[in-house]
Image (cartoon, coloured by chain):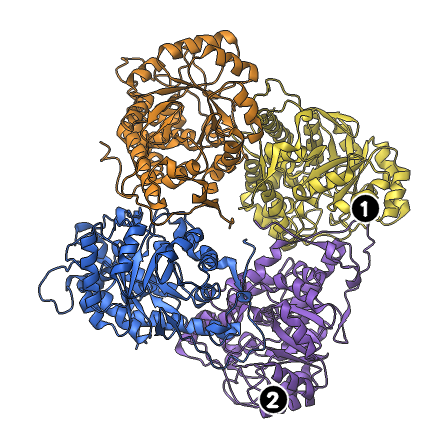
Chain colours: A yellow, B orange, C blue, D purple
Amino acid sequence: MSRAVLRPGDSIDDLRERARRRLPRTAFGAIDGGGGDEITLRRNRTAFDDLLLRPRALRDVSTRDLSTTVLGDPVSMPLLVAPVGYARMAHRDAELAIVRAGARAGTVCGVSSFTSYPLEEIAAAAGGPLWYQLYPPATSDARKAILERVRAAGFRVLCVTIDAPTPGIRRRELRSRLQLPLRLTPRLLRECATRPGWLFDYARGGAGRGRQGLPPVVRTPGGTRTTPAANSVVTADVVAELRELWDGPIVLKGVMRAEECAELVSLGIDGIGVSNHGARQLDSVPATIEVLPEIVDSVAGRVEVFVDGGFRRGTDIAKALILGARAVLVGRPLLYGIAAGGEDGAAGALEMLRREIDSTFALLGATSLADLDSSLVRRAPTR
Amino acid sequence: MSRAVLRPGDSIDDLRERARRRLPRTAFGAIDGGGGDEITLRRNRTAFDDLLLRPRALRDVSTRDLSTTVLGDPVSMPLLVAPVGYARMAHRDAELAIVRAGARAGTVCGVSSFTSYPLEEIAAAAGGPLWYQLYPPATSDARKAILERVRAAGFRVLCVTIDAPTPGIRRRELRSRLQLPLRLTPRLLRECATRPGWLFDYARGGAGRGRQGLPPVVRTPGGTRTTPAANSVVTADVVAELRELWDGPIVLKGVMRAEECAELVSLGIDGIGVSNHGARQLDSVPATIEVLPEIVDSVAGRVEVFVDGGFRRGTDIAKALILGARAVLVGRPLLYGIAAGGEDGAAGALEMLRREIDSTFALLGATSLADLDSSLVRRAPTR
Amino acid sequence: MSRAVLRPGDSIDDLRERARRRLPRTAFGAIDGGGGDEITLRRNRTAFDDLLLRPRALRDVSTRDLSTTVLGDPVSMPLLVAPVGYARMAHRDAELAIVRAGARAGTVCGVSSFTSYPLEEIAAAAGGPLWYQLYPPATSDARKAILERVRAAGFRVLCVTIDAPTPGIRRRELRSRLQLPLRLTPRLLRECATRPGWLFDYARGGAGRGRQGLPPVVRTPGGTRTTPAANSVVTADVVAELRELWDGPIVLKGVMRAEECAELVSLGIDGIGVSNHGARQLDSVPATIEVLPEIVDSVAGRVEVFVDGGFRRGTDIAKALILGARAVLVGRPLLYGIAAGGEDGAAGALEMLRREIDSTFALLGATSLADLDSSLVRRAPTR
Amino acid sequence: MSRAVLRPGDSIDDLRERARRRLPRTAFGAIDGGGGDEITLRRNRTAFDDLLLRPRALRDVSTRDLSTTVLGDPVSMPLLVAPVGYARMAHRDAELAIVRAGARAGTVCGVSSFTSYPLEEIAAAAGGPLWYQLYPPATSDARKAILERVRAAGFRVLCVTIDAPTPGIRRRELRSRLQLPLRLTPRLLRECATRPGWLFDYARGGAGRGRQGLPPVVRTPGGTRTTPAANSVVTADVVAELRELWDGPIVLKGVMRAEECAELVSLGIDGIGVSNHGARQLDSVPATIEVLPEIVDSVAGRVEVFVDGGFRRGTDIAKALILGARAVLVGRPLLYGIAAGGEDGAAGALEMLRREIDSTFALLGATSLADLDSSLVRRAPTR
């Protein structure tokens, strides 16, 4: 249980603060930071304040049910685990801790292309359906090779990132000379002077891997090391090919324009991920919650619409659901969670959000997702 | 008189600051705090800044009359005392002090379900009409038992809270491990190191109750102890039953949606309380002053409309009256008042607000409530 | 000359800061403060930021002429001296210094009802046309007595304040227990510990008045002392009477509603003063620059429209002129000026503003008031 | 190369901070400051936040081409070097360093009327087409004399500043008693106590000029010294004369009103420079990016439209290009650059911006200027 990690009254911001105190600046900045001047990073948060909730009166909400399905898979709540890189910097158990926490929460987990454990090992640790997040490589052969391995490992859904043709300008990473896998440079060691716990954990290496020194933080399916700054140009042709190669559902992640959805849907995909890459790619783009409504309108129910970006509270998540998202994905909260307390911390983050979603439903006068409608939210005059 | 408590130039914010200095953090946080990240708590205040007053010229305002009636009861001004829990944490005399202050001010007082003195004792202390604030319990028997006791104690109006099916996530309370009745835990004693006055007052126990140690802060009519985090699901059936059981006026408190008023009115109630529970329940809902105009429109005079939430100044109150509220209820100002100076502090808070309302009327060119019309306020461009 | 008082690059804000350092807190607060929570005091300033200037290209602006007339009197620029009370607290020479500075600047001066020198003495010190600011007393006899004395002293214009039926709630004054005339209470003496210059100047008494101890700061025309918190109810009947009694122009000061202008004009007055009393009366009213355009529209040229409230820069003043004001009145800048350097300080403030207006005209592509039109300003999207 | 000057993750703001630390306050303020209260200086920056970028999906952006032409001259990117005065205060090599950096970047450079080196020397140092920025003097003879010299020196484009009939009120310059050429006054020497590097560099004099003590910072083409606060009244007649005298392209810089563009274009000019003079002239005017769209509309392609003012990031520049600017000019970034590291610093600033523009194009889904259209930007609700 996550009792030792979470304290009464904690919010995700508290977990973040605990992660900030535990991690060296380089690692925290890589997890926490965004692209450019972090305008969109802040906007992803503040945009929620322009949406006001409008609770309904006189409803019997004594029992609530948050469960739903995503792409056919049942989940205990409309909150999924986003694929995140960098997890090894936050905690030694990295993706293993995260997918175990996801399983405990009864939800679906995304797994990043940039992991510290082989994807088969992650898949084995998981207890529920997994999404594989793909940065499609440049050649068809490489794409096929990855998909085969991913399929063999048992992943259910292919989640194709389409917004990373070039890495975002992430100043925090650049300023700390981040290289992956992290090396214990003098700079990093200096930062660790006040973070001995992290250093010990990190230097101890991967769980049960014997003596391999510092394990590679990043290990692509093909086995080559690479930096997590992906360079992945995804055209319609690439998507069409992936559609042919992959039997299961495909989600395109990184959509921000409603007028493009018709074309995307026509490629035979199953889900659209409204995402600005956690505000880590192009800065000065809208918050995802700002564009969600027009994208939901445009998609008109033909595929499921997911959203991520700055979700930190039950009310944030409820707003997206009210606006038509099938489910919300959270990434950084899990990384803060494992930084603060490993698997228990991640499980605690999910549990905290579940309680907040449940409380929001009750106070909104809704007992299930079917009770949500657009009257429950109002765009507020900005102030 | 409240001379020793109030100083020239004081605002309610000054009283609040004095309460903050006098109370241990746990007690002050329980009184002062809100739900979630306190977005609505702040919005309840800042929303007033979007409404500008438009004074009339050339009116003879040498004499003003603030009196009116609420649900048939005459009051000296359109400002009522909201029912508030937690009062015992602010001052030993708790609700007794508050209702006495209300009587001195010639206004109506609400009494919370969560009081530190038996409701009969409070009723005996009061000098004017009282409202009983009810969290309807789950069973009809329990509801009937309460109403009988409330009626016997002489309460005039039943004020039914409909926005508390589950407690709000109040982080300040959770972080201080608030339990009611307050126990002198090591944590609380540490906080009291710089608040010996409060500790002495609190530890001394209830007035004239003999040796019962720490008196329960919360004592429901049925005599059972409970935490003040109510779990009260109120459906239309419950309201209909209450309507049958209670002869006097009924106010439904916690209304935030104009489109629901027709149904609420059809249940035979007498008043609607526009309220977001002092921003203590669902966070990220509108300020009450924002939704007041549409609710007044919707009600169209069929019942009286009351409002609470963030009112701290005469101009705040005048804005609500101009927008159609019958009267405004204030809660925290009374708690700050008793924390700062017991009954005199509470009376001082009411007197301060009366003077501010009176000054606002004079400067607006209005001599009574009949002079108010919608031309006196303008929605400002937000900045 | 004002060389010693002003420094290159100074703004009115710099003068204010110098006044703040020179005056005891009580005196500075009485000059600088506003009503209520000073929402309107701030708004009077920030509202200018919502108006953007739109300079014209290709104009020959090598020579500029700022002169105009106000109510028939020629002035060197469309900037007048507002009547201000409290001047004795800022500097021993008080109104004498201000009207002399006004004369040096070639403009018209208003003289408050609350002065430290007899109005005849002030009139004698002045070198140009004067406005007498009147809080009409409650009886017709008292009004007549004042007007006779004012006329005899040679005042040109009667400026009737209509927004002070009751004093505003000025917390800074109340908190410092301000009483006028100022007495050297222990509290004030404590404040003077770091302001010996002010104390010496103040204690020395009036210029050339012999031994009268602390001179009364406030001396009404009738000779009685009173606090500057006026209680002056002004109805249409009072204005009609004043119109009969006074031969010269009459300005009604304190107008904030466009829909009332037709009635005000019909009373036979000559000017309208758009004013919120320097934000010292009712708080939470609009900034004067916000309501100026609609009032100018409503007046439609039948009388001259003046405006005051928060003007501190040449661009502020140009905006009001573009929006249709005949001239702008400034009050506090003169008080800051005399606090910083007596008559030279006041003259410096006026000269600074003249240079700023002139620079604004040149950069706007305007050589005189005739060149101003509404295309030179645009309402900006607030941010 | 500029490796020593720039560090990974640097933004132009970092260069600015380095300049602030290296330069005495007088010099930095002269470079960094704006007119009046610097409202427009801030607005030039914050206005970008109201424009959100809308990336396109599924484009092949593996190769990008930023090249274009400006007034017929090919440039490697749509970013030009603005003419800037004061350069000698930032670095001894002043304009020489800047034009060399511009040549390295493959772009066009503007050269100010106020330079520390003879314009022929600057022209000789440059490696690409140059614009000569002209404050037209008051007499026709003087204008002809300048144009002859400018033509003889090989300048391609005449860039006529039309917004400086009188100097802006630049408080930072006035407060530091800035006089040009800078003299080593006691005040400046005091500021240099912590900036010995700058003092040594400055006192050493011009490159290879022998013993002339402090070189004049400002040297007009006619050889007379003057302060950089220009007084240049430019009428349509003056422009018409310049059009006759100058064979090459003419740009009018300082345009802020769309309704004037028809007249300006009719004078036979080739380009319009949307500019508020780096917010150094009239304060409280709009940001240039705010008025750019309406000016582009009004010009309707008849001449090229350029823009400057507050551009500090690749996204800022991309927004202007999307809104129809032919190219963006940056001035202060070059001054920060030479202050931080001479020619390499300036080259680094241009290189940094090129990389940011390129990254923005890639992430927007654009491979060249032809791919930009208005759908890529959206006006955001201000917050």
Disc 2 from disc 1: Cα separation: 67 Å
Q: Is residue A330 left or right of residue C151?
A: right
**Label 2 secondary element:** helix
Q: Nearer the viewer, residue A76 or B62?
A: B62
Q: Is residue A126 above or below residue B241?
A: below
- Chain under disc 1: A
Give the residue displayed 43% in from the left and 68% down from the top. C314
**Image-based side of C329 in relation to A201, left or right:** left
Kind of residue sitting beneath label 2 = Arg
Under mark 1, the amino acid is: Thr
Q: Is residue B366 above or below residue D137?
A: above
Same chain shared by disc 2 and disc 1: no
Name the residue beneath numbered marker 2.
D143
Q: Which residue is mark 1?
A: A224
Residue D182 percent across, percent down from the top left: 48, 80
* Relative horizontal placement of residue C346, taking residue D62 as reference (left or right): left
Front tag of 2 and 1: 2
Image position, residue D259 (x, y; %):
63, 68
The answer, for residue A74, to whether it is visible in the render is yes
B146 vs C126: above or below: above
Dot 1: what SS? loop
Chain letter of the residue carrying label 2: D
Image quarter of residue A214: top right
| Residue D126: mark | none
Residue C42, x across and y down, in percent = 41, 53
